[in-house]
Image: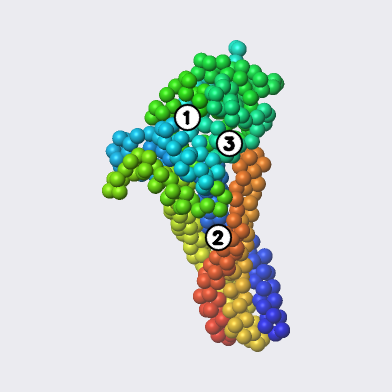
């Protein structure tokens, strides 16, 4: 109880000292505020970017493997000469692979991208539309929702019927205030009937979106182009059944593809098995470096702020030397004086940290309200900030507080 009473008195002394010296308090807060704001701001920006990119990567499917010619990994030392002579996946590979891994695959699809084209409907046209084609199981491999209409039936996919599903932006551009389902558009010079509209997604960090896409059955595309041509980036996409480890699916795919390509045990794979963990692994390394850089910049700012608070506390001790002498002559113990100045220093840092956090939250609110950008502020980072602020205050104020606690009461009273 005595300790709590002393703590309360120390807190009151410290708070009154801060209240009476407003300008000094504001200047002391500035360094800590900037440091905390920098650290939380950088971490929040990185977490937001990581979350957005992670959401984009998840669209590719965490248990989906893409059999392609080129690997997703890159970098300055990328050995492109090893991969350029590889054959692209073929329809034959797709058919054989579908038969071999049927039990462990929820869906297997052959997909090609025909690039950007201009789509027309009567006098309206829209440029830069991505044309994509895939076999019927595409709906099992890729997640998408419909604004209107439906997916292809199995008979439509097999017969290569001239039908299409269009993205929300395409529908809005070609058919303002109209129902596009049932309308006929020109795709690759062929009249094509619209049977469905993808729900609006918006473009993500990786540019993955079906909003500006026209999706057609693979067999329809085969009647127009050579879908095995490398320029269309053919890909066999395999989604594993629920509960199957991605490593197990990858192992089975590798064995099946090596068998199909008739590769000897000594020969390297002439295909790539791409998966989302390849992207997330590289992203984690990149964000780790950014986190370290942000912590270094913020830490340097806080260090400067800590020196500023230490200087202010030395000045505060000098100004209040006479009061310290009076307190000690009235029976105040050394630890009471020490506690008084330590609490003042910690309060300064906590106030600076709170102000820095408030600025970050205000900026996050503004970005969400006016720019529709959701900034993530991790609660663990907030707790870390509070601990860090307290620690900086403790370290910055210890030497001045210790010096104040060791003052001789007679000399201290005579100092004025």
Residue under numbered circle 2: 32
Name the residue located 48 percent from the left edge and 60 percent from the top edge.
299
At label 3, counting other C-alpha atoms closer than 10 Å, the crowd grade (few under 14, some 14-19, many 20 or more) is: some
Left or right, residue 308 beside residue 268: right
- Front in this rendered view, residue 355 or 14: 355
- 1 or 3: mark nearer the eye: 3
In the picture of the structure, the residue carrying the numbered disc 1 is 113
Sequence order check, earlier mark of 2 and 3:
2
Work out whether residue 54 or residue 407 is closer to the camera in this orientation and state it: 54
Q: Residue furthest top?
A: 123
Q: Position of residue 119 (x, y in %)?
A: 55, 19
Mark 3 lies on a secondary structure that is helix
Measure the C-alpha gap from mark 1 to mark 3: 16 Å
**SS category of the residue bearing label 2:** helix
From this viewpoint, is residue 413 visible? no
Nearer the observer: mark 1 or 2; the answer is 1
Q: Position of residue 289 (x, y in %)?
A: 43, 53
- Residue 46 higher or lower than 194, as above or below: below
């Amino acid at each position: 109880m005595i300790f709590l009473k002393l703590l309360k008195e120390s807190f009151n002394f410290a708070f009154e000292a801060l209240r009476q010296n407003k300008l000094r308090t504001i200047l002391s807060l500035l360094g800590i505020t900037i440091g905390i704001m920098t650290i939380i701001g950088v971490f929040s920006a990185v977490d937001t970017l990581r979350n957005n990119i992670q959401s984009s990567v998840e669209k590719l499917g965490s248990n989906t493997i893409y059999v392609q010619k080129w690997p997703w990994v890159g970098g300055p030392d990328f050995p492109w000469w090893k991969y350029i002579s590889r054959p692209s996946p073929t329809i034959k590979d797709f058919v054989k692979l579908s038969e071999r891994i049927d039990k462990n695959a929820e869906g297997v699809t052959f997909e090609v991208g025909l690039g950007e084209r201009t789509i027309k409907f009567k006098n309206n046209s829209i440029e830069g539309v991505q044309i994509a084609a895939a076999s019927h199981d595409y709906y099992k491999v890729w997640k998408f929702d419909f604004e209107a209409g439906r997916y292809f039936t199995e008979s439509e996919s097999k017969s290569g019927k001239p039908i299409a599903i269009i993205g929300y932006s395409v529908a809005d551009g070609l058919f303002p205030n109209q129902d596009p389902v049932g309308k006929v558009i020109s795709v690759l010079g062929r009249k094509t009937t619209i049977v469905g509209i993808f729900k609006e997604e918006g473009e993500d960090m990786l540019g993955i979106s079906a909003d500006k896409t026209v999706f057609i059955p693979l067999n329809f595309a085969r009647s127009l182009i050579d879908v095995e041509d490398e320029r269309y980036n053919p890909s066999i996409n395999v989604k594993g059944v629920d509960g199957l480890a991605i490593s197990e699916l990858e192992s089975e795919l590798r064995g099946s593809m090596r068998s199909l390509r008739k590769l000897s045990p000594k020969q390297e794979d002439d295909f790539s098995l791409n998966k989302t963990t390849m992207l997330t692994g590289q992203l984690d390394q990149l964000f780790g470096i950014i986190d370290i850089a942000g912590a270094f910049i913020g830490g340097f700012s806080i260090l400067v702020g800590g020196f500023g608070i230490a200087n202010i506390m030395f000045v505060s001790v000098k100004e209040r030397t006479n009061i310290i002498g009076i307190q000690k002559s009235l029976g105040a113990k050394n630890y009471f004086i020490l506690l008084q100045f330590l609490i003042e220093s910690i309060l300064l840092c906590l106030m600076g940290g709170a102000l820095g956090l408030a600025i970050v939250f205000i900026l996050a609110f503004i970005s969400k309200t006016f720019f529709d950008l959701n900034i993530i502020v991790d609660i663990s980072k907030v707790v870390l900030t509070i601990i860090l602020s307290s620690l900086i205050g403790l370290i910055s104020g210890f030497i001045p507080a210790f010096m104040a606690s060791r003052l001789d009461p007679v000399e201290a009273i005579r100092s004025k």
